[in-house]
Image (tube, rainbow, N blue to C red):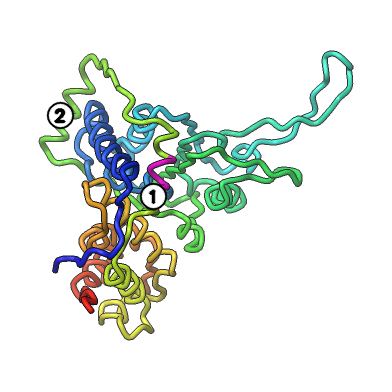
Amino acid sequence: MPTQPPATALEAADDLALADRLRDARAGVLTELRKVIVGQDDVVEQALTALFAGGHCLIVGVPGLAKTLLVHTLAQVLDLNFARVQFTPDLMPSDITGTDIIQEDADTGRRRMAFVRGPVFTNILLADEVNRTPPKTQAALLEAMQEKRVTVQGRTYVLEPPFFVFATQNPIELEGTYPLPEAQLDRFMFQVVIRYLSEDDELSVVQQTTAVQEHDLKRAMSAAEIVAFQRLVRRVPVAEAVARYAVHLVRATRPDSPLAPDAVKQWVTYGASVRAAQYLVLGGKARALMHGRYHVSFDDIAALAAPILRHRILLNFHAQAEKVTTDTVVEKLLAAVARPRANLA
């Protein structure tokens, strides 16, 4: 059903020019990434949507599917500072945030405490295998994600924008891991699933990576532009009917809701919070601009339902016994929840 455009829209010449720049920058990023990354266009699209919306991504996939390479290459194309932390059971919070150390002044000989910044002080932080470190260290990272600052010894240090966290998880090795609690998973805007490539794409990867590789990557945008894009995204109008559709989808994930379909009542213990609806609308705004539109459509919301909802739905024993996944539940939701009619009055 077509979306009734809202009464207000992006009309200022500067906003329209910036929107065109965002669309062109997206195309440029895709062009550069394809020099290194074969396939995975959907994954890149979701990463860019989170980038422009100011959210963080949890990337899930088996080893060898280029999760680390994707994030590192994206940082190069965006010309952003990049840091990678390999999460291990002995990793401490100070290994991420930084710590105070005693330094001696060469001129006066006096000793003083100086703060040494950790890897979190960057633009793009890759938290590799985030589920391999204890909850205390996970919490230190997630606090930085939420607050965009860290506190050490009572002093607060602000992280310079833009700041993004791409955390990876291996879904098949669970021994010796500390799974993220649902409340912490909720801090990630998207859970991006990287799947196996098609046969042709896999053949291309083998051919490219076993030959001499010389990639001349060009910068597609700057840090200042990304911050400007994030502000522009929040100014994109959204019709009430579209926002209500996002709210209905989220409310339908809760088993006690009148909107919940039979699949949710049968398979779900807990549904998504209001943060999911916020991310659906915010991500829809970013997706609309990326595709050259100045208002959000129902299709924008539906396209982002899986990556936003899949890690916010807690399945019960019946679903696990029947090998039902959260993606299956999201498919049932999209089929069951009607799109509200726009108010034309």
Horizontal and vertical percent for residue 90? 60, 41
Horizontal and vertical percent for residue 277? 38, 66
Looking at the rendered structure, which numbered label has been put on residue 53? 1
Considering only vertical position in the picture, is 191 above or below 96? Answer: below
Q: Which residue is drawn at 39% across and 49% down?
A: 53
Please name whichever residue, 196 or 79, is drawn nearer the observer in this view of the structure.
79
Horizontal and vertical percent for residue 23? 25, 40
Please name whichever residue, 167 or 22, is drawn nearer the observer in this view of the structure.
22
Looking at the rendered structure, which numbered label has been put on residue 204? 2
Horizontal and vertical percent for residue 212? 23, 14
Looking at the rendered structure, which numbered label has been put on residue 197? none
In the picture as drawn, the residue positioned furthest to the left comes out as 200
Q: Residue at x 16, y 34 (%)?
A: 202
Horizontal arrangement in the rendering, residue 314 relative to residue 302 (left or right) = right
Please name whichever residue, 36 or 276, is drawn nearer the observer in this view of the structure.
276
The quadrant of the rendering that contains the C terminus is bottom left
Question: For numbered disc 1, what is the local secondary structure?
Answer: helix
Q: Residue at x 36, y 50 (%)?
A: 233
Could you tell me how far apart the alpha carbons at marks 2 and 1 are, in whole angstroms? Answer: 32 Å
Tag count: 2
User: Which is nearer the N-term, disc 2 or disc 1?
Assistant: 1
Which of the two marks, 2 or 1, is nearer to us in this view?
Answer: 1
Span colored in magenta: 227-231
Q: What residue type is labelled 1?
A: Ala
The quadrant of the rendering that contains the N terminus is bottom left
Q: Residue at x 48, y 37 (%)?
A: 125
Horizontal arrangement in the rendering, residue 183 relative to residue 91 (left or right) = left
